[in-house]
Amino acid sequence: MRLPFDMDQFSPEEQSTIKRLYIRVVGAYSVVAMLLVVVVTAKSHFVPIDLESLLGSGRAMAAEQLSLKVCASRDVKLLMAIEDAGEDGTAPAEMVSDAFLTMLQARELCSSGRTRDALALYDNEPLTQMQAAK
């Protein structure tokens, strides 16, 4: 075995101590590497990979992201209608506050995954319909 540095400058006792420590370190690293191989191998036998469930969850996540994008776009439209009605004074204050409460309900429905119900709320909001008519 060749050590990574020149040992001629050390006494024979020091050289034997360094060799012993060097062997211990190499042995410890070997044991850790073997344990790592055993753990990885054992886990792969106990945890079978189900690719279909992984792909299915990816599709579900993509559908969820799409529905959140649709909800967000409707939310922005309603929010802009609320802002415009508030600035212009074209709608009564009660209608603006009802629109805001409707937006909060629709957000909650979108968050819980009930996108169709939320979109129905967004579409049936009188303030949005009034702004679209302009």
Image: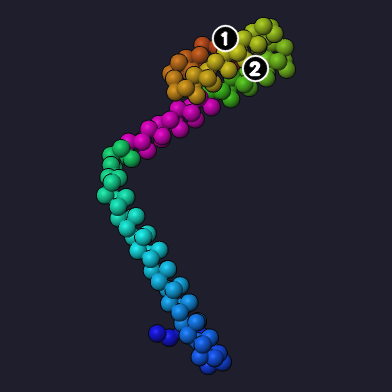
Lateral position of residue 20 relative to residue 89, left or right:
left
The residue tagged 1 is 126
* Most common secondary structure along the magenta stretch: helix
Query: Is the residue 103 above or below the residue 95 in the image?
Result: below
Label 1 or label 2, whichever comes before in sequence order: 2
Query: Is the residue 133 above or below the residue 19 in the image?
Result: above
Lateral position of residue 58 relative to residue 112, left or right:
left
Image quarter of the N terminus = bottom left
Looking at the image, how many numbered discs can be counted on the residues?
A: 2
Q: Is residue 38 magenta?
A: no
Q: Is residue 59 magenta?
A: yes
Quarter location, residue 90: top right
Q: From this viewpoint, is residue 92 visible?
A: yes
Q: Nearer the viewer, residue 22 or 106?
A: 22
What residue do we see at 41% from left, 34% from top?
A: 61
The residue tagged 2 is 82
Image quarter of the C terminus = top right
Which span of residues is magenta-colored?
Answer: 56-73
SS assignment at label 2? helix
Query: Is the residue 44 above or below the residue 81 in the image?
Result: below
* Identity, as a three-letter code, of the amino acid under mark 2: Ile
Provide residue 71's location: percent of width, then percent of height.
50, 24
SS assignment at label 1? helix
What residue do we see at 44% from left, 73% from top?
A: 24
Q: Nearer the viewer, residue 18 or 33?
A: 18
Q: CA distance from mark 1 to mark 2?
A: 11 Å
Lateral position of residue 58 relative to residue 16, left or right:
left
Lateral position of residue 40 relative to residue 74, left or right:
left
